[in-house]
């Protein structure tokens, strides 16, 4: 492995553990991770063949039949381990252990699998008793033991946030503590050429944070100004730098600028604490806890010592080992007005990169993230990249691996959102037990795919998501909206959901319907969604939602993910919204899948080229694409390690596309002339290889891939359909979603043929229903050029799962394939050998089999569609209990309305300010000729929010919530029939009048059964 050439007194080749350049430090990291693997037990690195893939006897999924039966059984009734979790908000320790146990039961009863305990009270409560009930205090620990004890009894898991609020803090850390978050603040004074400045050392231009009382002078430098500031950045002459620190005496300095017409700046640099308090409410405890230094071991130790010394008693420790899954840490949201710093940075920088950071201090100082000075533009950018790289390595070693190793020592894993600054999130995802993204902070689906890149190359199992947090969405967030987001992030590679969130029932100062951690936000506005729980009218329908999550997550945690192409990235940043050239906008819509890789992930064990594919035991990329650095002015630059790696892969036969003009590539960072020359030579050699194609524009990437013989596993007419592909032994699992790339994406319903590539050439398609757990052979499909074509019809946000496996995978017999039919649709009946035709019109129909055999069927008279317009509505109007001192008490008076035409509650005078559960009832008559050969589909039209349906007293199985249609099958009868549709709403319309000062600014939501509702009969007959 190449190392950066030292250019200072740093020993050549020293194995410093925080080499921060992309590609550097990999050997250290590999040793570190292998050590963790050996010591961590449950937290060890997972093999590429994941837990959901293996049967009890270790046999390969797909064969024998018993294995596929077990897999389908787990899909139908998924284990708790794959169920979604809730983020559970407590108001510090001011909770009742008995209520805590009840809330564990409430979550278990609706089918969620775990809780993540988080102390948040950003709703502005100032009445909490933090003296007697602080976070981490005796009352809090007692409640935590109650939660763990009840979770153990109910089979739930519990995750624990590392501290109250976020970023992580410790009550033993004050604003001036060595373990506190640190910044480098600069002062500046302008001195004319030949003039003398005498006086105090320039003070920091921005004031210190709250509570910070100490600051230490680090350096004083003088530099010549070369021109006027451009966009607030003053250009400086690098060669003019003079270190005048030794001229300081008792806080005073006297310095004369060299003669001439140019101005000079006298720059001082002050080290001080940031004084950042954790976000999400607070204060949480006494003494006040301050955010720790996230780049030093002492900051991490302050937190772990507090847990070990003050929280983790023997009883709690034992319960955690039985019930706990992971310690959790939120994203890296450090707030500094000056430059983020840590005391170990200068030494780590010198030893890692071989040059001194101090002469480059002027180009890294900033105010609220904006740089103030610059040398040469390219040089300044590369120095800043080097700083980010070293800080990333310090964060990795001292914070991430420090906490993960500590968690493993307590029998726990570490779940973490590894982003927020310019750090190598992609690589972090390769060693974190459970990396996590979020629907609120991620700008598009490529932000998830970045984390997938590290997870998949390392062979880990999970990518978690902090799901369904929406600004200004409290008490108005619908599952109609949430399920659309779920379909999208699952398609991007997420396979665990932590829903935001479940709130403890009450707290001092809370108003009806109870404590909500995020609303009202800071007492003045509608906050973040959502306080789920029994207070929500939709809670009764949550078992359907939980089952849908769990079945999808079972599938997405099975097997190994596979991709078509991988994009090399010079930097592993995420939460940026920066997608991939061509693939994001144009490749995904036509069926391509992509991921991302950086130097350090490409150096992981097992990442090699076999048969023209990269990492065949894992993501098995069919091609690599190298493009300009999208984070540094789109320069065609690459690290020496990156150039060496990519050249090696290309020599081994990996198809490679090079985007842009790489005739004069730059080496990333501040490097030696030898490194730059080697990068140029490696890239030139790579470009000369026959399996490497260079293109000038991203629109030419698909032509280049075609020239190299690289094809996607899925092809389709361009649409909003995207997918995730996993292979489990001989079985392909295709998760297909009509998904939004970003929140602003506009999508419409789709109905198209999708061509899927199977691992097994004898495979046939099956469709899995994540709402009901059913698995069924797809009767009609096409085989062409080794691909299987199936029809996919999805509403916006909807998804479906198609499995390609050998005939008999779902327990059916035979291998019947229908290639064409004149009927509306066909299915397989009986034992899977009988073809059933279905149509809404009477007549004779045909079904053509793959061998050319034509089957015939006759469908008799079918009643015309029946519009269902008249309904009796019985609505529970949820509202505060009059006169009750318990703000969680709710009364539900019933309002009855007869409707000759359906309308939203907001348009019905008796219900316009109501929220709750409405039960709509209608009756209709079917003719006496109705028989077992007839059925009907029910379309509800527009319905908001969740719903359930009963026909003649029997509940219809959970239906696709985003489609609002279902097959009523055998539930109908001749004569009078009754349909009941139960609709649950949000609480917004009621809260608008209960708490108008907060929620009155929102418009009424148009919810309820709005329709139009239509019953469409069909006939079904066996074809022969």
Image (spheres, helix red, strand yellow):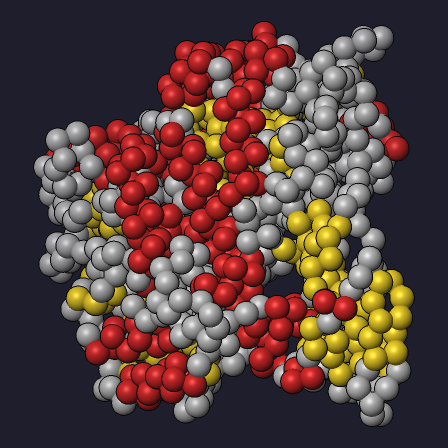
Q: Nearer the viewer, residue 789 or 406?
A: 406
Residue 967 visible: no
Q: Residue at x 80, y 36 (%)?
A: 522
Q: In this view of the protein, can residue 686 be seen by the observer? A: yes
Q: Is residue 110 above or below residue 360?
A: above
The x, y position of residue 636, in whole percent, is 47, 82
Q: Position of residue 495 (x, y in %)?
A: 41, 43
Return the x and y of residue 963 as percentages of the image width and height. Answer: 50, 43
In which quadrant will I find the C terminus?
top left
Seen in the image, is 183 located left or right of residue 591?
right
Q: Quadrant of residue 506?
A: top right
Judge from the rendering whether residue 569 lies leftward or rightward of residue 715; answer left or right.
right
For the image, the number of numbered tags is 0
Q: Nearer the viewer, residue 733 or 192?
A: 192
Which residue is at 33% across, 48% downward?
Answer: 32
> Relative to residue 104, is residue 915 depicted above or below?
below
The vertical placement of 752 against 494, above or below, is below
Residue 236 picture quarter: bottom right
Residue under the point 51% across and 13% down: 145
- Left or right: residue 921 versus residue 766 is right
Q: Position of residue 598 (x, y in %)?
A: 40, 65
Q: Residue at x 35, y 67 (%)?
A: 13
Residue nearest the viewer, comparing 962 with 514? 514
Quadrant in which the N terminus is drawn: bottom left
- Nearest the camera: 522 or 547? 522
């Amino acid at each position: 492995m190449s190392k950066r050439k030292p250019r200072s007194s740093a020993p050549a080749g020293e194995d410093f553990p925080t080499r921060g350049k992309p590609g550097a430090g990999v050997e250290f990291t590999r040793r570190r991770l292998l050590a963790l693997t050996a010591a961590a037990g449950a937290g060890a690195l997972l093999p590429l063949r994941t837990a959901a893939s293996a049967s009890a006897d270790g046999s390969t999924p797909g064969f024998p039949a018993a294995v596929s039966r077990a897999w389908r059984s787990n899909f139908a009734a998924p284990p708790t381990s794959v169920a979604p979790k809730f983020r559970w908000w407590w108001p510090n320790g001011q909770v009742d252990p008995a209520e805590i146990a009840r809330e564990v039961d409430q979550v278990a009863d609706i089918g969620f699998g775990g809780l993540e305990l988080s102390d948040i009270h950003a709703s502005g409560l100032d009445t909490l008793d933090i003296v007697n009930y602080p976070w981490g205090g005796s009352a809090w620990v007692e409640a935590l033991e109650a939660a763990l004890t009840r979770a153990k009894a109910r089979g739930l898991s519990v995750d624990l946030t590392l501290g109250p609020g976020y970023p992580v803090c410790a009550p033993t850390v004050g604003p001036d503590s060595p373990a506190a978050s640190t910044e480098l603040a600069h002062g500046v004074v302008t001195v004319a050429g030949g003039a003398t400045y005498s006086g105090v050392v320039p003070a920091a231009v921005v004031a210190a944070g709250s509570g910070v009382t100490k600051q230490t002078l680090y350096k004083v430098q003088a530099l010549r100004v070369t021109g006027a500031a451009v966009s607030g950045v003053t250009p400086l002459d690098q060669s003019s730098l003079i270190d005048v620190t030794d001229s300081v005496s008792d806080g005073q300095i006297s310095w004369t600028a060299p003669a001439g017409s140019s101005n000079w700046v006298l720059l001082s640099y002050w080290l001080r604490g940031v004084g950042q308090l954790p976000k999400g409410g607070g204060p949480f405890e006494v003494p006040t806890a301050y955010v720790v230094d996230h780049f030093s071991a002492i900051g991490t130790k302050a937190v772990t010592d507090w847990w070990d010394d003050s929280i983790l008693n023997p009883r709690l420790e034992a319960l955690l080992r039985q019930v706990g899954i992971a310690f959790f840490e939120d994203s890296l949201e450090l707030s500094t007005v000056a430059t983020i710093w840590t005391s170990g940075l200068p030494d780590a920088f010198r030893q890692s990169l071989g040059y001194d950071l101090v002469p480059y201090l002027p180009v890294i100082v900033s105010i609220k993230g904006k740089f103030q000075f610059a040398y040469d533009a390219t040089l300044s950018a590369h120095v800043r990249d080097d700083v980010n790289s070293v800080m990333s390595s310090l964060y990795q070693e001292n914070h991430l691996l420090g906490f993960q190793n500590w968690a493993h020592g307590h029998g726990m894993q570490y779940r973490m959102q590894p982003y927020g600054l310019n750090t190598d999130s992609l690589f972090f995802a390769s060693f974190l037990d459970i990396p996590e993204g979020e629907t609120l902070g991620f700008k598009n689906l490529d932000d998830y795919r970045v984390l997938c890149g590290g997870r998949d190359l390392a062979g880990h199992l999970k990518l978690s998501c902090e799901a369904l947090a929406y600004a200004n969405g409290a008490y108005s967030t619908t599952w109609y909206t949430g399920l659309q987001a779920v379909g999208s992030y699952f398609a991007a590679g997420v396979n665990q959901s932590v829903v935001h969130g479940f709130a403890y029932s009450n707290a001092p100062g809370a108003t009806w319907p109870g404590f909500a951690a995020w609303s009202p936000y800071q007492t003045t506005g509608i906050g973040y969604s959502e306080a789920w729980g029994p207070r929500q009218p939709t809670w009764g329908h949550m078992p359907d939602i939980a089952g849908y999550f769990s079945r999808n997550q079972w599938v997405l945690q099975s097997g190994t993910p596979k991709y078509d192409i991988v994009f090399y990235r010079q930097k592993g940043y995420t939460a940026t919204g920066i997608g991939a050239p061509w693939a994001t906008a144009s490749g995904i819509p036509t069926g391509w899948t992509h991921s991302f890789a950086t130097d350090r992930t490409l150096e992981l064990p097992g990442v090699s080229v076999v048969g023209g594919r990269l990492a065949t035991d894992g993501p098995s990329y069919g091609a690599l694409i190298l493009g300009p650095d999208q984070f540094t002015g789109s320069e065609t630059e690459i690290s020496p390690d990156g150039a060496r790696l990519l050249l090696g892969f290309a020599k081994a036969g990996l198809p490679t596309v090079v985007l842009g003009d790489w005739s004069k590539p730059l080496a990333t960072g501040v490097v030696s002339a030898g490194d730059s020359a080697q990068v140029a030579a490696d890239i030139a050699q790579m470009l000369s290889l026959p399996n490497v194609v260079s293109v000038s524009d991203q629109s030419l990437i698909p032509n280049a891939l075609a020239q190299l013989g690289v094809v996607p596993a899925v092809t389709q007419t361009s649409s909003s359909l995207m997918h995730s592909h996993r292979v489990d032994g001989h079985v392909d699992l295709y998760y297909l979603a009509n998904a939004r790339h970003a929140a602003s994406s506009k999508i419409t319903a789709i109905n198209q043929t999708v061509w899927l590539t199977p691992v097994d050439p004898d495979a046939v398609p099956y469709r899995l229903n994540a709402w009901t757990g059913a698995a069924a052979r797809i009767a009609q499909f096409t085989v062409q050029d080794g691909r299987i074509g199936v029809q996919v019809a999805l509403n916006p946000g909807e998804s479906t799962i198609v499995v390609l496996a050998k005939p008999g995978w779902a327990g059916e017999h035979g291998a019947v394939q229908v290639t064409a039919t004149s009927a509306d649709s066909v299915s397989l009946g009986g034992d899977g050998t009988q073809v059933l035709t279905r149509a809404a019109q009477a007549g004779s129909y045909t079904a053509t089999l793959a061998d050319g055999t034509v089957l015939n069927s006759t469908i008799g008279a079918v009643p015309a569609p029946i519009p269902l317009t008249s309904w009796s509505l019985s609505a529970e109007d949820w509202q505060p209990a009059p006169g009750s001192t318990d703000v969680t008490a709710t009364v539900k008076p019933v309002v009855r309305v007869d409707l000759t035409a359906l309308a939203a509650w907001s348009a019905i005078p008796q219900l316009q300010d109501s929220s709750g559960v409405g039960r709509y009832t209608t009756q209709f008559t079917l003719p006496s000729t109705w028989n077992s050969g007839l059925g009907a589909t029910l379309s509800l039209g527009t319905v908001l929010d969740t719903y359930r349906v009963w026909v003649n007293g029997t509940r219809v199985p959970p239906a696709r919530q985003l489609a609002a249609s279902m097959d009523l099958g055998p539930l109908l009868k001749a004569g009078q029939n009754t349909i009941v549709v139960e609709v649950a709403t949000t609480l917004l319309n009621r809260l608008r009048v209960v708490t108008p000062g907060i929620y009155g600014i929102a418009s009424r939501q148009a919810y309820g059964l709005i329709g139009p509702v239509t019953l469409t009969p069909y006939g079904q007959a066996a074809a022969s």
